[in-house]
Image (tube, rainbow, N blue to C red):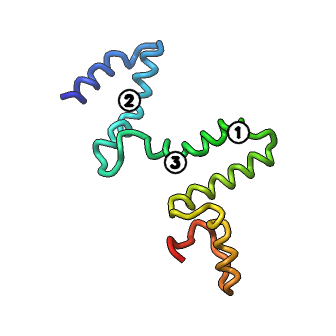
Amino acid sequence: MFYARLMHIFGMYKGRKDEVGGLVRHLTKEMDCLWTSLQEEGIGPTNNHTERMLRFTVIWRKRNFGTRREKSERFVECILSVRKPAVSKKCIPIRWLQMPSKISSKGNAPIPLLSIPDTL
């Protein structure tokens, strides 16, 4: 009932040349995506998970006023991208960075950081 009424209203405004018509045309194109959280199990209706994942980075950049150089920006990107998997595996980030060299020093081949098991 709701969907049919919504599509009827969209049909009334779809041909308009103003911002309302543009919005209706855009929403019509994205209609399948709008209802994914209702149709697919395990997908939440909000992006809270993504926002939580980015929160530390946003706060860090705001608190430190970003960076002044391109090289510094790349360093921050690398360090912050390593921090998230370390924290998600309940590991201290500096220990996370040290793990590949410890594994390698035991005679094993170096491994990428993302494939380090939860427990060593």
Q: Nearer the viewer, mark 2 or mark 1?
A: 1
**Label 3 vs label 2: CA separation?**
30 Å
Q: Kindly identify the amino acid type of the residue bearing the numbered disc 1.
A: Asn
Q: Residues within 10 Å of mark 3 (few under 14, many from 20)?
A: few
Horizontal arrangement in the rendering, residue 87 relative to residue 77 (left or right): left
- Give whichever of 12, 45 is nearer the camera: 45
Say which residue label 1 marks. Answer: 64
**Label 3 vs label 1: CA separation?**
19 Å
Comes first in the chain, label 3 or label 2: 2
Residue located 34% across and 43% down the image = 36
Residue located 29% across and 19% down the image = 9
Q: Kindly identify the amino acid type of the residue bearing the numbered disc 3.
A: Met
Say which residue label 2 marks. Answer: 28
- Give whichever of 8, 114 is nearer the camera: 114
Residue 56 position within the rendered picture, expressed as x and y whole percent measured from the top left: 57, 45
Q: Residues within 10 Å of mark 1 (few under 14, many from 20)?
A: few
Residue 35 position within the rendered picture, expressed as x and y whole percent measured from the top left: 32, 38
Residue 8 position within the rendered picture, expressed as x and y whole percent measured from the top left: 26, 21
Q: Kindly identify the amino acid type of the residue bearing the numbered disc 2.
A: Thr
Residue located 51% across and 64% down the image = 89
Say which residue label 3 marks. Answer: 53
Looking at the rendered structure, the secondary structure element under dot 2 is helix
Horizontal arrangement in the rendering, residue 5 relative to residue 73 (left or right): left
